[in-house]
Image (spheres, helix red, strand yellow):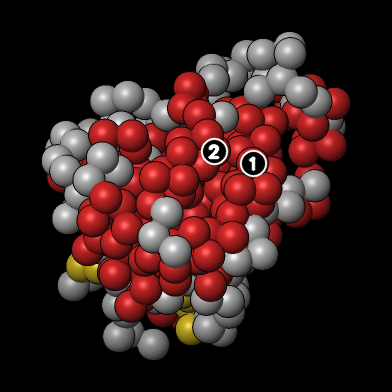
Amino acid sequence: MSDFQRGMLVQHVSLGVGKVVATEPSAVHVFFPGGEDRFARKLRLPMALPMLSPACGDASAWLAGLSAFALDAKTGRYGLAEKWLSHEQAIARFQETFERGFADPKYTGDGKDGCERSARWRHAHEAFVHAFAQGEGERLLAVGDVDELIRRALRVERHVRALQNATEKPSLEDALKEPAGARGYFAAMFDLLSAPAPERSRFEALASAVAALPPGGARESGWALITVLPFIARPDRHMLLRPRFICEAAQRLGFDLRYNPEPTWASYAALLQSTDQLLEKLRPLGARDYIDVESFMHVVTTRRSTHPKASDRLVT
């Protein structure tokens, strides 16, 4: 086997499954996820050929999605960002705050001890269900009561307003000021939520409806308007995308985000794939949905570990 391609998974006789992150005429750079080393190994060719074989397609969905490798000028090797955390390190950081994982009383409580993030999202979800479930949102839309739709949406959003970065999001209240634009927004959002899974055509229809709303800041600010209410409504299907936060999380956890400041289905689909893989890895700790994933990412990207990260091991 000598036809290596960037992104393919390979099996090494002793190092296990790895991902090809770069190729040279006389070498191949392969990242193996064991340990805490963020660097890919440089395997010389043709000596390494007998030790490598193609890995099966489903050998590691997480590894297949790992991205953002760049050439490190100091070492001459390809590696993830210096702030990258292995999954084991990320789990350890999360459990420094919530020792019992997602079942920890501090996590599942009412947030009075300052650990309120997941509680706020859950309360917002309950408020959305109360306001719009059983076709109530569609009924209000059908009779043209856009003002009531706006009032209910703002009551829901108020539960989590403090969790969102004001520099990243336009005001939902300002965005929904014009009745015609608000009507289009709610119609597209309810249509998106009615599908059994996120769909490209419905996502793009909602993105178009948001683009037609009054200006609310940088073009990337549309991401919050597109994703926040669907995330609150169905955290088992839809994920929140706040640009600065999610890009930081992608660097820390090695997501293949394909981020575009202009809201696109490609970026959103990549986010869903990455967060779904993370959710599966977090289920042993009690994670249930994307609210737990969002809370986990917030802890591992914003809170300093009390245990310093081990130095990267350089392999020659």
Rendered position, 222 above or below 272: above
The residue sitting at 50% across, 65% down in the picture is: 138
Report the residue marked by disc 1.
Answer: 127
Q: Quadrant of residue 97?
A: top right
- The residue at which mark 2 appears reads as 156
Pick whichever, 253 or 19, lies toward us.
Answer: 253
Image spot of residue 66 (x, y percent): 43, 58
Placement of the N terminus among the 4 image quadrants: bottom left
Secondary structure at badge 1 equals: helix
How busy is the neighbourhood of tag 2: few (under 14 within 10 Å), some, or many (20 plus)? Answer: many
Answer with left or right where residue 267 lies relative to residue 138: left
Q: Amino acid at mark 1?
A: Ala
Q: Please tell me which residue is depicted at 29% across the width and 70% down the height of the picture.
A: 205
Total labels: the figure holds 2
Taking the spot 42% from the left edge, 76% from the top edge, the residue there is 199
Q: Residue 89 bears which disc, if any?
A: none
- Sequence-earlier tag: 1 or 2: 1
Q: Is residue 137 above or below residue 316?
A: below
For the residues labelled 1 and 2, say whether their Cβ atoms are less than 8 Å apart: yes
Q: Position of residue 29 (x, y in %)?
A: 34, 61
C-alpha gap between disc 1 and disc 2:
6 Å
Q: Measuring from the top left, give residue 300's x and y in whole percent.
A: 55, 31
User: Mark 2 belongs to which amino acid?
Assistant: Val
